[in-house]
């Protein structure tokens, strides 16, 4: 099932064992190489320290928050050796400029939708400039249309230009 990024950001991490919230989600940890949410940065309630919740430790995503087995699901970032490269990138998808292969500027990423079972980002939503948004609105871009993600921008396939319908000329 697809969910928007806002369904997990600023949500509580709920423990099944204690039945209470143990942390609050602050930001996602996104791997730009494959657009996967590898984990979530959280703030512990007990000592206000910054911890990481890995995606494989998530039991369920509910409207009330993200469910985990216990407090042990939260890890110190320094302990995550396999994720060190991704953590060091500090990649942020929202706000990235989007352009086509032919260097046409499309807009900026303002949201994304991810698959809850795999945590792969499936769609990105792009807000356009004020002028373009009046004529075309915002864009939804599927992950298959993305060609490259760099630290500075997202590059997508060239978009098809829409041609306004022309009226049929009356025969004289």
Image (cartoon, rainbow, N blue to C red):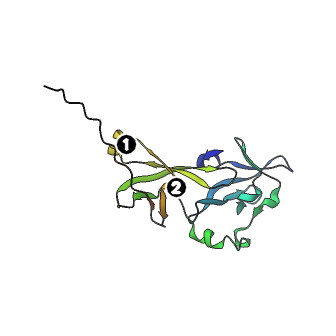
Q: Which of labels 1 and 2 is toward the front?
A: 2
The answer to whether residue 94 of the structure is visible from this angle is: no
The residue that disc 1 covers is 133
Residue, x 67% and y 53% (percent of image)?
A: 25
The answer to whether residue 15 of the structure is visible from this angle is: yes
Left or right of residue 87, residue 52 in this image: right
Query: Within 10 Å of the Cα at label 1, are there few (<14), some (14-19), or many (20+) other Cα atoms?
Result: few
The residue that disc 2 covers is 144
Mark 2 element type: helix
Left or right of residue 59, residue 30 in this image: left
> The C terminus appears in which quarter of the rendering?
top left
Residue, x 18% and y 26% (percent of image)?
A: 170
Q: Earlier in the sequence, mark 1 or mark 2?
A: 1
Q: Which percent across, then down, holds residue 18?
A: 86, 49
Left or right of residue 75, residue 104 in this image: left
Q: Which one is in front, 104 or 134?
A: 104
């Amino acid at each position: 099932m697809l969910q928007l990024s806002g369904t997990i950001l600023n949500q509580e991490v709920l423990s099944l064992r204690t039945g209470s919230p143990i942390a609050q989600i602050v930001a996602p940890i996104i791997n730009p190489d494959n657009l996967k949410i590898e984990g979530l940065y959280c703030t512990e309630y007990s000592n206000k320290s910054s911890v990481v919740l890995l995606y494989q430790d998530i039991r369920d995503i509910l409207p009330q928050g993200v469910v985990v087995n216990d407090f042990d699901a939260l890890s110190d970032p320094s302990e995550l050796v396999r994720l060190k490269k991704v953590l060091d990138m500090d990649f942020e998808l929202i706000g990235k400029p989007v352009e086509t292969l032919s260097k046409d500027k499309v807009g900026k990423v303002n949201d994304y939708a991810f698959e809850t079972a795999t945590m792969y980002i499936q769609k990105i939503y792009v807000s356009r400039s004020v002028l373009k948004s009046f004529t075309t609105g915002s864009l939804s871009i599927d992950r298959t249309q993305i060609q490259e993600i760099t630290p500075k921008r997202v590059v997508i396939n060239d978009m098809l230009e829409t041609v306004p319908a022309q009226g049929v000329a009356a025969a004289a």
